[in-house]
Image (spheres, rainbow, N blue to C red):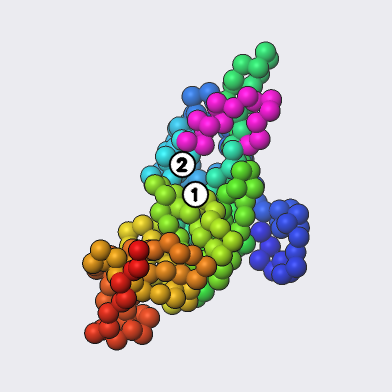
């Protein structure tokens, strides 16, 4: 995509400038064809022979997501189903993937067509990280999925992020959105000046924290616009208090039932 696209660019303007990777699979999910851009992005010439199962071309942590997406596409009636949509995080890029099941004469399944777009420049900035030898780019927007729509959530609007199995829920003042990225993937790409992982299943925007409480002897916190308590692990307790500027000897108020 053209990195110099104007801030007021329409989605169509941006879409026209995305490079598109196209991969064709047979019914057994073996790669049978791909375009030049897909060859450059996927490790065809580096580590993998061409005719491998498509899961082999994805990072191990992303393979269950791709497998689920292909399974869902296979279960849908080909004539009526929209492409399945998913976000995949690789070390230096963020890819938007769509897949459709294909059929031949008589509606007999013949395979899949997988299309991916590199949306890294739309949702992130390198923030000088490349000069420090870090390929990961800082997220400015978190791509979330709602049906067949991709909603880009500004990180400034995020109150907290909660783990949901291999995936996450991104919470804002207006509700929560499903995200295909795992909590560890997101954690490494958020600005550490404003976000902190306070528990194995929770990341919070420190600017949104408005209350610290004690609940059954454990520290929990609340963020603006939500009454749900967010647990704080014992190993994160001291660091959180320091980040919030709370004196080490201070105690949180007990939560009222």
Please report contact status of discs 1 and 2: CB closer than 8 Å, yes or no: yes
- Residue picked out by circle 1: 180
Question: Is residue 85 at all visible to an observer of this figure?
Answer: yes
Front residue of this view, candidates 6 and 3: 6
Calculate the distance from the C-alpha at mark 1 to the C-alpha at mark 2.
8 Å
Residue 65 got which mark? 2
Image quarter where the C terminus lies is bottom left
Tally the marks. 2
Q: How crowded is mark 1: few (under 14 residues within 10 Å), some or many (20 or more)?
A: many
Residue at horizontal 40 percent and vertical 54 percent from the top:
163
Front residue of this view, candidates 25 and 212: 212
Residue 256 in the figure: left or right of residue 46? left
Quarter assignment of residue 109: top right
Image vertical order of residue 252 relative to residue 25, above or below: below
Tell me, yes or no, whether the highlighted magenta stretch contains residue 175.
no
Residue at horizontal 50 percent and vertical 71 percent from the top:
224
Image vertical order of residue 255 relative to residue 181, above or below: below
Q: Given the current orientation, which residue lies at the most extreme front position?
A: 257
Image quarter where the N terminus lies is bottom right
Q: Given the current orientation, which residue lies at the most extreme top position?
A: 106
Residue 37 got which mark? none
Residue at horizontal 23 percent and vertical 67 percent from the top:
217
**Which range is magenta?**
68-83
Front residue of this view, candidates 155 and 245: 245
Q: Earlier in the sequence, mark 1 or mark 2?
A: 2
Residue 162, given in percent of the width and then of the height, sits at 42, 57
Residue 4 in the figure: left or right of residue 66? right
Front residue of this view, candidates 252 and 106: 252
Residue at horizontal 46 percent and vertical 35 percent from the top:
67
* SS type, badge 1: loop
Residue 73, given in percent of the width and then of the height, sits at 56, 31
Residue 165 in the figure: left or right of residue 70? left
């Amino acid at each position: 995509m053209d990195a110099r696209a104007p801030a007021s660019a329409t989605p169509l303007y941006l879409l026209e400038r995305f490079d598109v990777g196209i991969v064709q699979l047979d019914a057994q999910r073996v790669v049978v064809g791909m375009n030049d851009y897909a060859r450059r992005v996927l490790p065809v010439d580096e580590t993998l022979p061409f005719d491998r199962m498509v899961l082999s071309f994805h990072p191990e942590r992303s393979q269950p997501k791709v497998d689920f997406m292909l399974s869902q596409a296979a279960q849908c009636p080909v004539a009526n189903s929209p492409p399945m949509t998913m976000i995949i995080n690789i070390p230096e890029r963020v890819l938007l993937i769509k897949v459709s099941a294909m059929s031949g004469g008589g509606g007999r399944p013949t395979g899949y067509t997988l299309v991916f777009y590199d949306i890294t420049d739309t949702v992130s900035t390198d923030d000088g990280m490349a000069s420090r030898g870090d390929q990961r780019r800082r997220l400015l927007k978190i791509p979330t999925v709602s049906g067949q729509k991709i909603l880009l959530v500004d990180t400034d609007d995020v109150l907290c992020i909660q783990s949901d199995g291999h995936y996450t829920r991104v919470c804002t003042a207006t509700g929560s959105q499903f995200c295909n990225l795992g909590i560890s993937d997101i954690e490494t790409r958020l600005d550490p000046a404003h976000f902190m992982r306070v528990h194995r299943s929770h990341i919070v925007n420190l600017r949104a924290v408005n209350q610290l409480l004690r609940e059954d002897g454990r520290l929990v916190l609340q963020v603006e616009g939500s009454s749900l308590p967010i647990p704080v692990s014992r190993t994160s307790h001291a660091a959180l208090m320091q980040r919030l500027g709370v004196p080490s000897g201070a105690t949180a108020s007990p939560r009222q039932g």
